[in-house]
Amino acid sequence: MEVATRLFARWGFTATTTAAIAEEAGITEPILYRHFETKHELFVAIVRDMSRKTLDHWRELIARSTNPSEQIRNIAREFPDHLKHLGYAYQVLHGALSTSRERKVVAVLREHYNEVERFFVGIITAGQKSGEFRGDVDPKVPAWILINLGIGYAMIALNLNRRNHFSIEQAVEFVLRGLKS
């Protein structure tokens, strides 16, 4: 999976062949197919693994506080380092997001973003219930603002090697000010 992730990140899902993955991994294609019946299955496994690692990391970060604003700040503070750790996987995800129309690929991307949406909606809803955040806002709206902020930050940081192109923490503060009661 590591080799496939690196090659998908470099060449894109469509352009990367199973033959290239097998060769780079030092195995034969039949051995690759013992683990993954298709290139699509390998892609799905990569995205699900990245998604699980991301959400597990974020859950660990938010466990430090019961304050919804602080939970979001903790994620923002750690996001640049998180990107360094899972950079290739995020490049795979974003590359497929912008180029792929293949049904299985789109389905796993939708699955990933639905999970991320549920995660942030949970935090925002908790903030609304506690009175910290405005209750007149559909929690999906700020959730997607945060998601899109993360996508934009990641795409520039990973693809243009500009990790400090803006402060993700300041951007999140801007969003939090809009959520305040």
Image (spheres, rainbow, N blue to C red):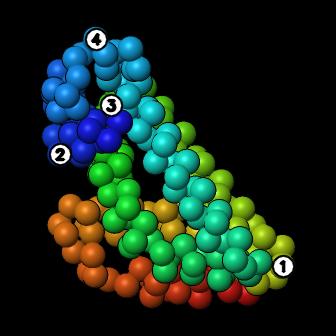
Disc number at residue 10? 2
Give the amino acid at mark 3.
Answer: Arg
State which tag comes first along the sequence, 2 or 1: 2
State which tag comes first along the sequence, 4 or 1: 4
Residue occupied by mark 4: 30
Which of discs 4 and 1 lies nearer the camera? The answer is 4
Report helix, strand or loop for mark 2. Answer: helix
Residue 68, position as x, y percentages in the image: 70, 77
Residue occupied by mark 1: 130
State which tag comes first along the sequence, 1 or 3: 3
Is residue 61 at all visible to an observer of this figure? yes
Q: Residue at x 46, y 48 (%)?
A: 50
Q: Residues within 10 Å of mark 4 (few under 14, many from 20)?
A: few
Q: As rendered, which of 156 and 34 lies closer to the eye?
A: 34
Is residue 109 at all visible to an observer of this figure? no
Residue 70, position as x, y percentages in the image: 65, 83
Displayed quadrant of residue 118: bottom right
Give the amino acid at mark 2.
Answer: Arg
**Quadrant of the image for the N terminus?**
top left
Q: CA distance from mark 4 to mark 1?
A: 55 Å
